Structures are given as C-alpha cells and as structure tokens.
Image (cartoon, coloured by chain):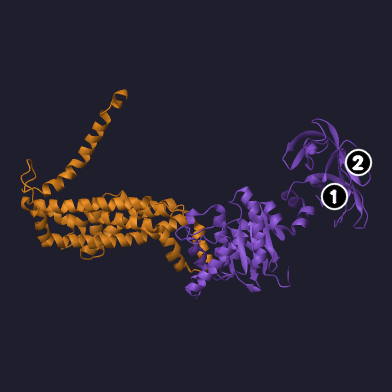
Chain colours: A orange, B purple
C-alpha cells in the first residue's frame, strides 16, 4: 500500500484505465477526420469530406430518422408506463410488490438474443404480423420500461403524499392534482427517464436486427456497412456525431436525476 | 358560542383497517365556531377521525353531518372543509403567493380579486412581504402560517388541523397556541384539531374529546376534563395524578356529602362523593392532582386529608418543584408539585428520607369508581 502512495503512481494507474476505456472510442473522431478509408496510423491529412459523404448517404439518413422516430416513441411510451408503475409501487401498499417489480425489471437481465428470438417467433408465428419499425418499437418499449421505472421510482420515493391530498383538499380534481402537483414535482425524473429510454432505444442493435423489416434502424444499417471499407469513414463520421450527442444527453439526464425534490 | 344546531355531527362512525378498528362507534357533536380538540395517544384513532371529516377516509358505518348535510358521499375537493396537514404540505414548486391562492384557482375569480384575497391572507398571518418567497425559504413557523392561510382563503365551514404545532420548537409552539386561538376568534370558523399533546389541547380548545383505542372516553371543557375527569384513564392521560385505592366505609344519599374510604395502610381518607352512585364496601379510587398537595411537618387539621410519607426525591423545574414520596401501602410514589413562589421556597421544606405529612383539602380530591 505504501508503495502506491508514492507521487505519480496513482495518476499513472488512472491514466492507464482511462486509456483502456476511452482510447478505442476516441479513435472514432480521429479517423473520421483522416483522409483515408483505412483505419491505421500514421494519419494522412485532415478532411471533413466523410461528414459530407455521410450527409449525402440517403439510406443512412433514412435509417437515422427511423431510429430517431422509434426512440422518441419508445421514450414516450415507456415513460408513461414506467410512471404509472412507479406511482403505484411508491404510493400503495400492495401484496406481491417485490414480485411485481421483479417482473417489470426482468427485461434488464434477460439476454437480448433470447428476447429477440422469442419476440421474433411471437410476432411472426403467434400474431402473424409483418416485421416493421413498429415491431422494433414495441420491443424497445419493453426494454426501456425498466430504465424508466428505476429513474421514476427514485424520484417518486420520499414524495410527501400529503402534497397531493392538500391539492385535493383545496378543491382540485384528481386530474388537476396530477397536472398541477404530481407532474411538476416528478418532472426532472420524467425528463431523465425520456432521455435514458431514448438512448437505450437509439443504440439498440440486437432486437432491431431480429425485428426490423425492410427499413433498418441506424445500428443495423451501420452494421451492414462495416463489411465495405469504402463506406467505413462515413460510419465513423456518424459515430462521432452520435458519440458527442450521447454524452450530452446522458450528462443532462444524470444532472436531472440528481436534482432532489426540495421540501 | 355553541348554538342549537351543531356544525358537525358524527353519528355512530366506525372505520376499520383490516382487522384493526381504528375508530369504533364514535358519536360526537361539534358546535358552530367551536375550537375543538381531539386528544389521544398515537394509534388512538384521532387522525383517522379527522381524515374522515376531511373526506380522505370513508366511514365503514355511521354518518358524518356538516350543518345537517350527510357528507360521506362528498369527496374532499367538494367538502366545505379544509385541512392543515401535519407536514404542512406546502407545494415546493410554488412560491408563497401561489401556494395561498391555490384553492382559488378553480373558482371563477379575476386575477385582481385573487391577489386582493391573498394580500388579505398574508396580512392575517402577519407575513405581508412574503408573497414571492420560495417554499424552501420558509421557517417552520412560517410554513405553518402559509398552510393556514392556504386553507382559510377557501372560507371553509370547518378548518381541520392535524397536529398543527407538532413540528415547531417549544417556544414557537407556545406563541402559536395563543396566535391560533386569536386567529380562530377573528375568522369565526369552526376549528377541529388533533393532538397528542394535552397541554396544547388544554390551552387552545373550547372543548376536548379524549380518544383511546378508537373510542371517545370523555368530551368536556378543559377545566372540567382536568378537574373532574370521569374515569381513571382520562385522569391519567391528562396531566399527572395520584391514585389512592380503597373501599367505601360510609355513604349517604346526598350528592354533596363526603365519603370516607378505607385506603388500607394509607389510612382513612375523605372525598366528596360527586355524582357517583356507590355503596359501602365498593372499591373506589381517590384521585388528587400533585399541585393540590402540600408537604408539612404537622398533622392535618379539620377539613384536610393527610398521609405520612418518606421523601425520596425532588426535582427542581424552575417555576415549580416536584417531590416524590414513598407511602407505606402505596405501590406508586406519591407526586407533589409546588409552585416556587418565593426564592426561599426553591429548596424543599423537607430533607430526603425525612418522614413528612402530605395534606390536601378534602374538596380537592376526586372520587372515581375503580
């Protein structure tokens, strides 16, 4: 232990960890600005042409929009459902509460490949519906609910029940109470849940791979491009853009989640 | 104060939570403009009763009438009652003005009219410049006043208060006791409050209902409740009291007569018969408050009871001192309270382990049936 305390050793270890964790990710933006279709050193010349190429790739933009649409819907639906579940769990004493929460959380630990395979046979053989962005969206709602639920339970716990009772007592209906008291107080949690669900859905690959029809989502489309070196740089460019947006969204979500109810 | 038709009439109301009878067949009338206290230990059902008045709980049996109208079917948002919650439940996302005006939002009122009403309320609670303060900037006492204003602005027929002073420190609590009373007189609204603090109930209320295990065991004015509790439970719950058990030796039919009881080793004691119907040989209890007792070295004179005891402890509480005595034949220590009127009286008249007389005028005792 003493040896580790020597100046310079701990920072060195931290630097090493950081390198292992982030170097591969940071290669993305570096090579996306390099004038070569191959990802190797030494770097050749600075260019932004891959970003232009990315913007001009029609199927890429289409798949990007498909993913954004699915993620928006999944974020909204899972937040609504997660909110209802979180409200019930935090407000009422109920039997089997632990079991109930367990079932809602289950998609977190069921391997995606199993979930994907079973949803595929459920949609195709059992319901006989055609695969489309809708089937992907439904699957994404399923895996986003646990995240919404976790964020919202944390927010609604410690919520003073008498605030809602006070509103009711002061003449408001149940709906008015929800709109004027419950929702504003839960808002940071609601926004955090939406952002988190959006991200979970947006970069989800396995379920989308199983369940998408003719229109691929962005991760699926990107995966299909990786086989062709020529299209790699545009993927890198898009990857860099998404990376930066993801970091921003997650930071904002965390920041919102940590805001406590002031009472 | 009390007029002919009660403001609130609770008739045979019971409320069960599973097997627990929180409120058990309670009947009670509360008069118009009365400041009414429901006093009880935690778990006595007092809060459940208050929540039934507010509409948050529905009675399983019985009915509650407000100005003669049954209200069980009426939801909290349509009842002519408003509540001050124990936690005050100030909306944290709204400022003071928005909190107070909350109950007016549903009424068809102009903004100017609402502002006028809020200003009047801020004046009433003596926080005139607090309108724009955020909820988290308020102290405990200020939060309570805002909660009061927020409820009163709706002009309820009945204001319900759940442990209104419980969250405040001692000094502020004493101030608010007086202030709440003045406020109640000023607005002329029936106040019903729940408390576990007997002092709070005695100082503020016109009448007090004492609750225990879901039942009301006595309803009376503070003075009557303290001086002549109707049973041992009430006597012990409110203030301190010494209980001396014995059997009736002689009795007569006249209510003003004095009863002599045999308290075993403690000796013979006299006590006014009061309203009790008793016969010779009945086991009874003589109850006497600590402040009615005096410690002396001399045997009691005519019209006084006296018992011998050994001083075992005294505790000095500033304005008064408490003395504890062991009395032969008494399972509990006798408690005596004396006001420290003079500086010299701060020290007791007796030393520890000294045998002394404890005396009290016969009419200060109270006869209770065991």
Relative to B221, B74 lies left or right: left
Residue B247: image x %, image y %?
A: 87, 46
Q: Is residue A133 left or right of residue A257?
A: left
State how far apart marks 1 and 2 are (Cα): 14 Å
Image position of B283 with respect to A122: above or below: above
**Residue B78's disc number:** none
Q: Residue at x 59, y 67 (%)?
A: B81
Badge 2 crowding class, 10 Å Cα cut-off, few under 14, some 14 to 19, many 20 or more, is some
Q: What percent of the width, then of the height, locates residue B124? A: 59, 64
B102 over B310 or under it: above or below = below
Q: Which residue is mark 2?
A: B300
Q: Earlier in the sequence, mark 1 or mark 2?
A: 2
In the rendered image, residue A246, in percent from the top left (x then y), is placed at 24, 52
Please state which of residues B309 and B166 is positioned toward the viewer in this rendering: B166
| Between B112 and B170, the one nearer to me in the picture | B112
Give the quarter of the image for residue B211.
Answer: bottom right
Could you tell me how many numbered marks the image carries? 2
Residue designated by label 1: B364
Residue, far top: A2
């Amino acid at each position: 232990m003493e040896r580790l305390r020597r100046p310079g050793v701990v920072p060195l270890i931290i630097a090493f960890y950081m390198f292992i964790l982030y170097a591969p990710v940071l290669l993305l933006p570096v090579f996306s600005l390099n004038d070569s279709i191959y990802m190797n050193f030494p770097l050749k010349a600075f260019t932004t042409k891959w970003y232009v190429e990315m913007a001009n790739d029609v199927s890429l933009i289409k798949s990007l929009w498909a993913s954004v649409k699915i993620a928006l819907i999944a974020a909204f639906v899972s937040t609504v459902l997660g909110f209802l579940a979180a409200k019930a769990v935090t407000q009422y004493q109920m039997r089997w509460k632990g079991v109930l929460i367990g079932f809602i959380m289950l998609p977190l630990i069921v391997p995606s490949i199993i979930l994907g395979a079973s949803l595929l046979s459920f949609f195709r053989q059992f319901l006989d519906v055609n695969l489309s962005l809708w089937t992907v969206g439904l699957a994404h709602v399923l895996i986003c609910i646990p995240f919404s639920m976790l964020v919202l339970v944390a927010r609604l716990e410690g919520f003073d029940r008498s605030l809602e009772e006070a509103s009711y007592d002061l003449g408001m209906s149940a709906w008015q109470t929800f709109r004027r008291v419950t929702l504003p107080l839960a808002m940071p949690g609601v926004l955090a849940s939406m952002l988190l669900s959006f991200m979970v859905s947006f970069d989800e690959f396995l379920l989308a791979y199983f369940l998408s029809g003719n229109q691929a989502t962005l991760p699926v489309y990107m995966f299909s491009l990786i086989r062709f070196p020529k299209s790699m740089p545009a993927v890198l460019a898009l990857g860099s853009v998404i990376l930066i947006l993801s970091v921003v969204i997650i930071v904002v979500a965390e920041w919102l989640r940590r805001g406590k109810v002031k009472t | 104060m009390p007029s002919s038709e009660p403001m609130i009439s609770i008739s045979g109301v019971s409320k069960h939570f599973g097997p627990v009878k929180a409120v058990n067949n309670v009947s009670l009338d509360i008069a118009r403009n009365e400041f009414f206290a429901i006093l009880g230990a935690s778990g006595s059902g007092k809060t459940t009763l208050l929540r039934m008045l507010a509409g948050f709980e529905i009675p399983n049996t019985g009915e509650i009438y407000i100005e003669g109208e049954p209200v069980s079917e009426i939801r909290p948002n349509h009842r002519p009652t408003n509540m001050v919650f124990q936690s005050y439940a100030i909306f944290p996302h709204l400022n003071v003005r928005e909190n107070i005006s909350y109950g007016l939002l549903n009424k068809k009122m102009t903004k100017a009219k609402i502002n006028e009403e809020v200003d009047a309320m801020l004046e009433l609670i003596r926080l005139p410049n607090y309108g724009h303060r955020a909820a988290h900037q308020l102290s405990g006492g200020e939060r309570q006043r805002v909660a009061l204003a927020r409820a009163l602005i709706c002009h309820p027929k009945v204001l319900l208060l759940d442990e209104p002073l419980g969250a405040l420190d001692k000094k502020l609590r004493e101030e608010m006791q007086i202030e709440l009373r003045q406020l109640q007189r000023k607005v002329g609204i029936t106040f019903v409050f729940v408390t576990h603090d007997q002092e709070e109930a005695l100082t503020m209320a016109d009448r007090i209902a004492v609750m225990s295990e879901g039942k009301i065991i006595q309803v009376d004015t503070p003075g009557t409740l303290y001086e002549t509790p109707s049973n041992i439970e009430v006597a012990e719950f409110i203030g301190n009291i010494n209980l001396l058990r014995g059997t009736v030796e002689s009795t007569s039919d006249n209510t003003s007569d004095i009863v002599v009881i045999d308290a075993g080793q403690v000796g013979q004691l006299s006590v006014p018969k009061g309203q009790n119907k008793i016969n010779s040989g009945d086991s009874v209890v003589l109850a006497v408050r600590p402040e009615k007792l005096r410690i002396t070295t001399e045997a009691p004179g005519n019209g006084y009871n006296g018992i011998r005891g050994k001083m075992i402890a005294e505790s000095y509480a500033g304005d008064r001192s408490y003395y504890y005595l062991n009395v032969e034949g008494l399972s509990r220590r006798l408690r005596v309270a004396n006001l420290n009127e003079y500086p010299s009286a701060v020290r007791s008249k007796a030393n520890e382990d000294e045998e002394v007389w404890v005396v009290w005028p016969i009419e200060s005792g109270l006869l209770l049936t065991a």
